[in-house]
Image (tube, rainbow, N blue to C red):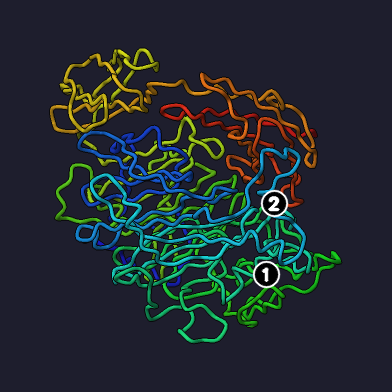
């Protein structure tokens, strides 16, 4: 293995600790994007959330709505491995996925998800009331109905099937359901086999002016107080957890976490605390350093009465630590102790020894000192990190590449990337490489393949072949967006893979259905001769080796015919089409509201959804979700059921005045046909000036 360089020549350690774009890094000159190729693996990944690459290069990838899919490179197929029942209010659903460190021997797959339980849901018979939304104010009994969990379990993978009946529960993280936001959910392992799990602060950020949500009022839903979670030493939320999974499920506590087992008012699972939404991280495969990114609150500017502007953070966690949320961004950037009942600001919090006096706190009163993140940036240009640009804040901690000289692979990345952790920005659509010194301080930031599109990068992982696998969310809100995909980025300076194209005529109908398939538009970048392999019914067997072919589907079903194209050097790529045979997909349309309809935040918007289907329409199966659109992302705030109803839009003062705010309404209907089909429609409302 080649590892990151130490001190460089006569450059002192003090100089290396200062981020400087001009420093030389011998051996780390990155090759041009033209030496790489992005190869699409799945153009239809659902609402993509997380991925995990198996030792045989199959790729597990999850959708928030519960689907676990497997990309099979030998055939090009994308197979549904499981549909996990999940609770889906706001951001909940399937989150992280990972494979066991000894997967080749035990075939365990880990999934972090929200089990349905008996949490209240909206009743379509009461269109003016949404029973699935937790109350903002009330009593402890009112809030108790919405207590739930996020669950980390493992399941056996047999072939391409995730055996849901084999579930072993590992750990459950308590949640307050029925209200947005922040569930975290990344899973990874270190060299000793310890499992790391990131958890969000499970707190509503929308009534805190974009600063710290520390509302302690007795009648308020506790979800408005992040002191009960991220700032609580006795709670698993807003944390990076570190555990050792047991032989039959459950877990034990490894040495070296933030609190020793038995320490009063603490949870020994905690490795790092004071995190808001640590959505993505990765453990360095050579050093066990955790590269973690944490999302910021939304204030556009600092306020001396409330605290700093919103800032994203990236940290190289090499020891247990408290990163400060909701009290501090960094040791020198405290929030202000604000009384939500009186609107009066108090003193700044003491970042050297934060005090958690919240009545919602069940942990220690005096917290560990605040650790500084290695990278902190805001919406505007950063004097320290100008390479990060400007725009929204969506930090994603990515993997560090470990170059293996002995690995025989035609797609593995070059040694110039060895030891460099990747950093992805979800809202800015890029990936960067961080250069680190021996103290894990960032000394240089380089763009990674800026000519290659990273469209809302959701998850990244290097595979056993040394290629980078990327899951992209695309532009849109809580659905399978047209530009969402699973892809592999190969190092291919000499020869590249074919680029297949597939069309089907007709695109649907009742069985028996004769369909003509064409590969017109398929090309090879190097002009190599191509061979074709069609699998029309997704059974893993080749049905035709012609460039164009026909096939008759004799039974109704949802099919994903796939074409795998291989060039004369052995490089291959595949493409699919979605082909519903049987009942037609319903057509879903908003009657009201209309696209670009003006409104003001706080308005109650009445909706009417029309559904056209080839079977009787059941309005109880219609769902309408209100999403606060902000830059390229959105926050789902309420979901109603029924063809008619109303949703009150709201905007917290922290978003007020921000650019690119919209109200997004998404309607969805799944029919009862054979097989069931789903239709959706989206309208975006524009706020009045």
Please, what secondary structure does the residue beneath circle 1 have? strand
In front here: 387 or 665?
665
Please state the horizontal and vertical placement of residue 673, each as a whole percent of the image.
46, 27
Instruction: Find the distance from the CA under tag 2 to the CA under tag 1.
Output: 16 Å
In front here: 212 or 667?
667
Q: Residue shown at 40%/46% (left/top)? A: 62
Q: Residue shown at 79%/37% (left/top)? A: 600
Q: Tell which circle, 2 or 1, labels the residue nearer the N-terminal end.
A: 2
Which quadrant would the C terminus be assigned to in this image? top right
Q: Which residue is mark 2?
A: 300
Mark 1, other Cα within 10 Å: few <14 / some 14–19 / many ≥20 = many
Q: Which residue is mark 1?
A: 334
Residue 518 occupies which quadrant of the picture? Answer: top left
Please state the horizontal and vertical placement of residue 182, each as a whole percent of the image.
57, 56
Pointers 2 and 1 in contact (C-beta within 8 Å): no
Left or right of residue 346, residue 429 in this image: left
Q: Residue shown at 17%/46% (left/top)? A: 409
Could you say which disc has been placed on residue 373 in the image? none
In front here: 178 or 659?
178
Left or right of residue 441, residue 217 in this image: right
Q: Is residue 502 above or below residue 156?
A: above
Q: Can residue 420 be seen in this snapshot?
A: no
Q: Can residue 152 be seen in this snapshot?
A: yes
Please, what secondary structure does the residue beneath circle 2 have? loop
Instruction: State how many labels appear.
Output: 2
Mark 2, other Cα within 10 Å: few <14 / some 14–19 / many ≥20 = many
Please state the horizontal and vertical placement of residue 453, each as a whole percent of the image.
42, 36
């Amino acid at each position: 293995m080649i590892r990151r360089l130490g001190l460089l020549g006569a450059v002192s350690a003090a100089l290396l600790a200062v981020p400087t774009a001009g420093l030389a890094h011998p051996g780390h000159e990155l090759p041009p994007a033209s030496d790489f190729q992005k190869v699409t693996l799945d153009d239809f990944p659902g609402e993509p959330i997380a991925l995990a690459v198996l030792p045989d290069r199959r790729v597990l990838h999850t959708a928030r709505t519960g689907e676990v899919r497997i990309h099979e490179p030998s055939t090009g197929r994308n197979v549904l491995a499981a549909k996990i029942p999940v609770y889906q209010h706001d951001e909940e659903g399937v989150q992280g996925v990972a494979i066991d460190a000894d997967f080749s021997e035990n075939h365990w797959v880990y999934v972090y998800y929200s089990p349905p339980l008996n949490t209240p849901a909206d009743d379509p018979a009461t269109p003016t009331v949404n029973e699935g939304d937790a109350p903002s104010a009330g009593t402890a009994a009112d809030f108790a109905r919405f207590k739930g969990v996020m669950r980390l379990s493992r399941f056996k993978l047999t072939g391409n099937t995730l055996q849901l009946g084999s579930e072993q529960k590992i750990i459950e993280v308590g949640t307050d359901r029925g209200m947005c936001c922040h569930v975290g959910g990344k899973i990874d392992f270190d060299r000793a086999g310890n499992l790391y799990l990131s958890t969000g602060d499970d707190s509503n950020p929308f009534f805190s002016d974009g600063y710290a949500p520390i509302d302690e009022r007795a009648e308020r839903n506790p979800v408005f107080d992040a002191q009960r979670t991220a700032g609580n030493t006795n709670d698993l939320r807003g944390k990076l957890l570190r555990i050792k999974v047991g032989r039959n499920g459950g877990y034990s506590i490894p040495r070296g976490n933030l609190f020793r087992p038995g320490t009063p008012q603490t949870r020994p699972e905690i490795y790092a605390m004071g995190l808001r939404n640590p959505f993505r991280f990765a453990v360095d495969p050579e050093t066990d350093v955790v590269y973690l990114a944490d999302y910021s609150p939304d204030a556009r500017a600092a306020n001396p009465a409330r605290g700093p502007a919103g800032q994203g953070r990236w940290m190289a966690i090499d020891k247990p630590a408290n990163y400060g949320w909701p009290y501090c961004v960094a040791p020198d950037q405290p929030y202000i102790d604000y009384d939500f009942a009186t609107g009066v600001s108090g003193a700044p919090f003491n970042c050297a020894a934060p005090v958690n006096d919240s009545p919602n706190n069940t942990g220690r009163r005096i917290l560990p000192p605040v650790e500084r993140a290695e990278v902190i940036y805001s919406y505007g240009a950063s004097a320290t990190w100008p390479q990060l640009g400007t725009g929204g804040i969506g930090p994603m901690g990515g993997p560090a590449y470990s170059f293996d000289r002995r690995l025989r692979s035609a797609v593995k990345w070059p040694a110039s990337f060895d030891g460099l952790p990747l950093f992805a920005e979800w809202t800015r659509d890029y990936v960067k490489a961080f250069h680190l010194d021996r103290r894990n301080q960032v000394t240089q930031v380089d763009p990674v393949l800026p000519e290659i599109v990273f469209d809302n990068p959701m998850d990244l992982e290097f595979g056993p072949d040394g290629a980078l696998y990327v899951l992209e969310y695309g532009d849109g809100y809580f659905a399978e967006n047209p530009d969402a995909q699973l892809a592999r980025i190969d190092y291919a300076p000499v020869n590249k893979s074919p680029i297949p194209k597939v069309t089907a005529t007709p695109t649907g109908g009742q069985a028996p259905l004769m369909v003509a398939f064409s590969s017109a538009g398929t090309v090879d970048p190097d002009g190599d001769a191509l061979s074709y392999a069609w699998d029309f019914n997704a059974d893993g067997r080749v049905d035709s080796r012609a460039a164009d072919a026909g096939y008759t589907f004799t039974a109704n079903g949802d099919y994903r015919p796939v074409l795998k194209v291989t060039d004369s050097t052995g490089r291959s790529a595949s493409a699919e089409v979605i082909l519903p045979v049987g009942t037609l997909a319903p057509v879903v349309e908003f009657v009201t509201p209309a696209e670009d309809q003006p409104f003001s935040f706080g308005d109650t918007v009445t909706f009417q959804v029309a559904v056209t289907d080839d079977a009787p329409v059941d309005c109880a199966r219609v769902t309408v979700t209100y999403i606060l659109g902000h830059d390229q992302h959105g926050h789902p705030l309420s979901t109603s059921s029924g063809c008619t109803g109303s949703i009150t839009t709201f905007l917290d003062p922290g978003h007020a005045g921000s650019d690119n705010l919209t109200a997004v309404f998404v309607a969805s209907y799944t029919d009862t046909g054979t097989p069931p089909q789903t239709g959706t429609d989206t309208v975006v409302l524009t706020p009045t000036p």
